Image (cartoon, rainbow, N blue to C red):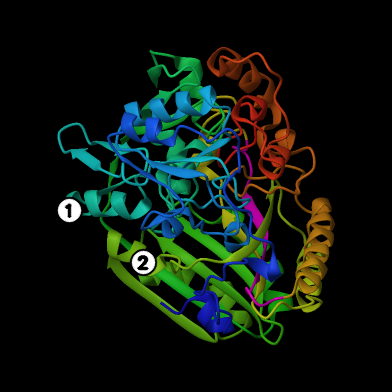
Amino acid sequence: MLSRRDFLKASVGLGVLGITGCGGDTLVPPAALAPPLPLDQLAASLRGTLLRPNSPGYLNAALPWNLRFANVLPLAIAQCQSAEDVRASLLWAQENQVPLVARSGGHSYAGYSTTTGLMIDLSTMNRVDFDPVSGMARVQGGGRNQNVEDALRPASVALPHGRCPRVGVAGLVLGGGIGFDMRLHGLTCDKLLETEVVLASGEIVRANAVENPDLFWACRGGGGGNFGVNTSFIFQTYPVDRVTAYQIIWTERLETLLPLALELFPQMPRELGAKLTAATDGTTLSLELLGQLVGSPADLRALFEPFYQVAAPFSEQIQDMAYWDGQDFLAEPDTTDYSHERSRYAFRPISAEGAAVILDYLRRWPGTGAAANWKFFLAGEQVAALAPDATAFVHRQASLISSIELDWLGTTSPEVVALNQAWQDEFHQAMLSFTSGFCYQNFIDESQQDYLRAYYGSNLERLVEVKRPHQRVSLPPIHPHRAVKEQRSWFESSWALARAPSF
């Protein structure tokens, strides 16, 4: 498949990490705490490995997906092998007043899986077991999309998943979980049957519809790290067969194509999974359709006939494939990035005026040497089949999940990055009139105002109530963005652990 970055020629230099991070950011070393911390004590309590700054593999394990946070290095990385290892790490951090984060895939958009304190790394807990009789799959807390595919492909079953092979299932499901299957099968969290959680107290509990049901409700969309560290998940899978996978790119008549797409896509059948991207590299403006249809290539071309009537594509790939082969075709290239993403849900069709605003801002992009885009993921149908309060994921009635993505290089100057982020902020504000003030919690954004209401809407108050008994600390929560930037202690940050905001 032709990747977006290949098409826009925007991938130069992304694979090399400089020690100073983006734009000359100063390296943030491991926390210098006095008196010296008893790391040997922690190491002795783990079945897994405790990595320290001089350990082989430390820098690779500390590296996040978003390279703008690669300059933040942990005091130590506890590579846990069990829930008991997680428990020991949590209790050690509390006893020694050390800030911490939990990490499964390291794909926190805003860097909330980085710290100068203790990183609780679940990535070695990545086993996936499938029971063909019940159709249930058990995924350990560090399992990634690729682990799920490897385990479920032989049985021709699936659960709702994302495109990026190295994204952690934990972060995906705890924030809801979107993907090309969601219109037909719902969100990742909708297939969750049970999860094991290590609470702040060190207690290891199960949460399902019967046992700790409020905690179970909160774990389906309430965000990672807000209630504990999730060490395993049990999902109900569904059978899969064949899909028509597609990638179609236009470079002409976008003023007609984009408003047409924004009008027609919410009316498409539930069998269609789709992502639309309007992108620029500063020279070329393009419109890409990417996704899958549970149906034939002829069915897909019939659905997209209105677009073909407007303009012939610049490139087109449409293939009938076995389901998991189709997911390989659609997978996001597994590269690290310097990136900032800002999202908005749309609950009504975006007008032609909104489409014109999108194209206008992309044409006025200041440029970073990489790329920028506006995109949406088509929602609705089975996502909307549940009530907004059925799970913690509240944005059930949205038809689109849109976002503005800004990418840059390690060589891009801080001044140019700041200019581009100002452009992105203005673009984000301009789209408010055509979308909504609600945002996707898994596209977490440290610059989002009124972030709790934007992520959780009318479910916020219940989430706060659920959090209170599981938090097991009496100190008031603080803004998680300050918790990361100021490196407050674990108690002060009040469960601002990884991907999600603290209540």
Q: Quadrant of residue 86?
A: top left
Amino acid at circle 1: Pro
- Where residue 176 sits in the image (x, y, percent)? 52, 39
- Disc 1 target residue: 154
334 or 200, which lies in front? 200
The residue that appears at 38% across and 18% down in the rendered structure is: 205
135 or 117, which lies in front? 117
Callout in the foreground (1, 2): 1
Whether the residues at callouts 1 and 2 have beta carbons within 8 Å, the answer is no
Answer with left or right where residue 295 lies relative to residue 162: left
Q: Quadrant of the N terminus?
A: bottom left
47 or 318, which lies in front? 47
- Where residue 2 sits in the image (x, y, percent)? 45, 79
Q: Residue 384, relative to residue 69: is it above or below?
A: above
The residue that appears at 43% across and 40% down in the rendered structure is: 170
Q: Which residues are magenta?
A: 395-412
Q: Quadrant of the C terminus?
A: top right
Q: Quadrant of residue 360?
A: bottom right
- Where residue 358 sits in the image (x, y, percent)? 76, 67
Residue 402 sits inside the magenta stretch: yes
- Disc 2 target residue: 244
Could you say whether the residue bearing mark 1 is in a helix, strand or loop? Answer: helix
| Label 1 packing within 10 angstroms: few (<14), some (14-19), many (20+) | few
Residue 192 visible in this rendered orientation of the protein: no
Answer with left or right where residue 147 lies relative to residue 302: left
